[in-house]
Amino acid sequence: MNHTPLQKSFPKDYLNRSLLKVKTMFRKTDVKMLLTFSKIVRRSKDSEITVLDLGCGSGTTIEDFWQKMSNQNWRYKRRLRGKKLKTIGIDISPLPDMIPKRVFKTAPTPQTEFIKADAEKLPLPDNSVDFAYSVGLLRYLKDPLRALEEGYRVLKPGGVFLWLLSGYTDISTKPTIEKILAETPDAADAFRLCFGWSRMRGTLICTKKSSSKFTNFPFKLSNSFRKSIILQPTDEFLEHRVYSRKDS
């Protein structure tokens, strides 16, 4: 597999997360990932459910998702309620070169697609995804707010996007996440921030309601700077963003 310098600095389990580990990470922020998925399936009138893993790494979470939703695992299969499953993995890394061959055996094509793309410009149509999740991705993006807007755009009405924040400054240092949401018209209809026992980890829940009028954030990226204190090997890649209002 070909890895980027950033990926080489990650521990191996970061690139090969299981569905169980991802569920556990969300649960620490009081969010039940598969229960959310089940509610979406139950509400959907479509015969096929599309799931997006943004920042999919080597695709192992998608592999595990398919394995648990297969005919052999009735406890998970019932969550699909007889509907077909389609999965999309998107990462900026070389794809599908870095995806192990075994993943394609468990997550068959064309029901599974891996795409090399930027999270800030998703190559997906509007209203095309039922359920999406992303783990710790926002901190590595140049403009996280743009990625949030893209995530909202591709959701179907009634769809949900779970963004796991690996740090309080995943989106910006100034203003805070809460301030950005508070000063964005109709953001309360589209985004809800959940923290668990630690304020250093949370989940930004994006829900696309048919009544929501949210379109974008009224902020522009005004500054970006490297973090000065090295806490772990991956910190050298981190940038903190400062946003300002477009109309101020």
Image (cartoon, grey):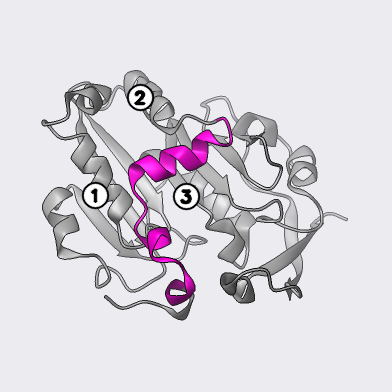
- How far apart, in angstroms, are the residues tagged by discs 1 and 2? 18 Å
Name which of mark 1 and mark 2 comes first in the sequence. Answer: 2
- Name the residue nearer the viewer: 245 or 194: 194
* Number of numbered discs: 3
The amino acid type found where label 1 is placed reads Glu
Question: Tag on residue 63?
Answer: 1
* Residues at marks 3 and 1 touching, judged by CB atoms closer than 8 Å: no
The relative height of residue 13 versus residue 202 in the rendered view (above or below) is below
Q: Nearer the viewer, mark 3 or mark 1?
A: 1
Q: Residues within 10 Å of mark 1 (few under 14, many from 20)?
A: many
Name which of mark 3 and mark 1 comes first in the sequence. Answer: 1
Q: Residues within 10 Å of mark 2 (few under 14, many from 20)?
A: some
Q: Residue at the location (46% across, 80% down)?
A: 5
Q: Residue at the location (58% across, 74% down)?
A: 233
Q: Say which residue label 2 marks.
A: 38
- How far apart, in angstroms, are the residues tagged by discs 3 and 1? 15 Å
The relative height of residue 139 versus residue 135 in the rendered view (above or below) is below
Q: Quadrant of the N terminus?
A: bottom left
Q: Say which residue label 3 marks.
A: 134
> 226 left or right of 136?
right
Name which of mark 3 and mark 2 comes first in the sequence. Answer: 2
Element on which disc 3 rests = strand
- Please give the range of residues in magenta: 7-30
The amino acid type found where label 3 is placed reads Ser
* Residues at marks 1 and 2 touching, judged by CB atoms closer than 8 Å: no
Q: Residues within 10 Å of mark 3 (few under 14, many from 20)?
A: many
The amino acid type found where label 2 is placed reads Ser
The relative height of residue 123 versus residue 4 in the rendered view (above or below) is above
> 8 left or right of 120?
left
